[in-house]
Image (tube, grey):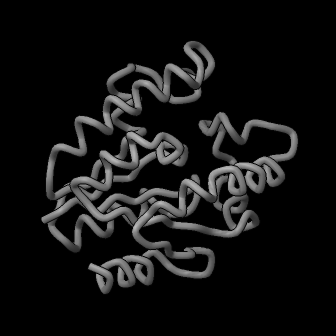
Amino acid sequence: MRNVVLVGFMGTGKTAVGKELAEKLKMKFVDIDDIIEEREGMEITEIFAKKGEPYFRDVEKEIIKEISKKTDLIIAAGGGAVIDEENVRNLKTGGIMICLTASPDKILERTKGYVHRPLLNVPDPKRRIAELLEKRAQFYARADCQIDTTNLTIDEIVQKILEML
């Protein structure tokens, strides 16, 4: 089976939905961010702090290139992965790309207390979320379809994806 690639902003449900979907479809779940942390031997916040975002994006691109060559995977891609055209091309080559969305309020609610999210470690995280969502909207629009997860349970989101497939 082709890969199912979940993209979208942090807090939209990529990991939770991806794990549940993988279980239902008897496929393997992989989270690009987890692979980066494992390969680099440090958390993403540490990579951003010590090596910078450009370094992180280079590692992310290399891992996406590798993962995209495999099949039968449910892939959760990091929130910013779709900014890079090559990442999008690679992810879509072997699978269907589904963008999970949510309102800024819901994202803030879901991510409060996420100290490991360097992009939200700012004085006004809600404003930062809104800015990033606006900046990334054109990139998220490249997905094959979108699901607004704001008022849905994980099971409801999984069901919608299963119906699409």
Residue at 50 percent of width and 63 percent of height: 13
| Rendering coords of residue 80 (x, y %) | 54, 43
Compared across the picture, whether 161 is left or right of 7 comes to: left
Taking the image as shown, residue 85 lies to the left or right of residue 141, namely left
In the rendered view, would you say 41 is above or below 142?
Answer: above
Q: Quadrant of residue 23?
A: bottom left
Q: Where is the N terminus found, in terms of image quarters?
A: bottom left
Position of the C terminus, as image quadrant, is bottom left
**Residue beneath the point at 68% across and 38% down:** 119
Q: Identify the residue at horizontal 62%, vertical 75% (top origin).
A: 150
Q: Would you place residue 62 above or below residue 146 in this image? A: above
User: What number of labels is visible?
Assistant: 0
Residue at far top of view:
50
Residue drawn 24% across and 45% down?
A: 68
Residue 37: % across, % down: 41, 29
Q: Where does residue 36 sit, x and y in percent of width and height? A: 38, 30
Which residue lies most toward the right here?
123
Q: In the figure, 143 relative to 61: above or below?
A: below
Q: Position of residue 137 (x, y in %)?
A: 63, 59
Quadrant position of residue 60: top left
